Amino acid sequence: MRTKFTSWDIQEYLKTEEDIADYLNAAIEENDPEFLQVALGDIARARGMMELSRQTGLSREHLYRALSKDGNPRIKTVEKILDALGVEMVFRKKSPKGKSADSVM
């Protein structure tokens, strides 16, 4: 019996602001800035670079460059992208290793 494989594309699963927030939170939990940058790029492509360019006031070329594997986006660029995507950055106290943030008082 043959196994049939299909391609999987994260962009197909980034339909709502909640989907986007969940993906970004998962990326942050990896504690890998490059992965967060890749996640932002995935989301930007899922929403459409042209539309994101229009909403942020940044050129498509700037967005592609900033969100590429070798890019280094400024915090202002990230803020504009997040705002256009309808999500925000939130900070919380870091939990001790092995404990969830909810159990820390």
Image (cartoon, helix red, strand yellow):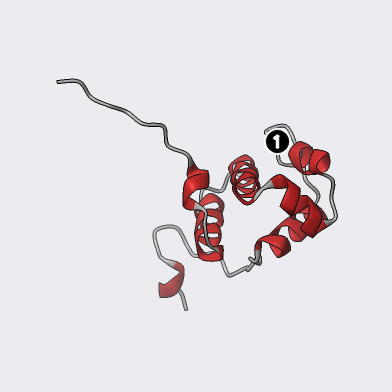
Identity of the residue furthest to the top in this view: 2
Identity of the residue furthest to the left in this view: 1
User: What residue did someone put label 1 on?
Assistant: 68
Question: Closest to the observer: 61 or 104?
Answer: 61
Tell me the residue at 67%/33% (across/down).
69
Tell me the residue at 49%/65% (across/down).
95
In this image, 1 relative to 46: left or right?
A: left
Q: How many marks?
A: 1
Q: Secondary structure at mark 1?
A: loop
Relative height, residue 7 to residue 15 (above, below): above
Residue 87: percent from the left, percent from the top? 63, 65
In this image, 103 relative to 82: left or right?
A: left
Relative height, residue 88 to residue 75 (above, below): below
Q: Quadrant of the N terminus?
A: top left
Tell me the residue at 61%/47% (across/down).
36
Residue 103: percent from the left, percent from the top? 40, 74
Q: Amino acid at mark 1?
A: Ser
Categorize mark 1 by other alpha carbons within 10 Å: few (<14), some (14-19), many (20+). some
Relative height, residue 80 to residue 73 (above, below): below
Question: Closest to the observer: 5 or 25?
Answer: 5
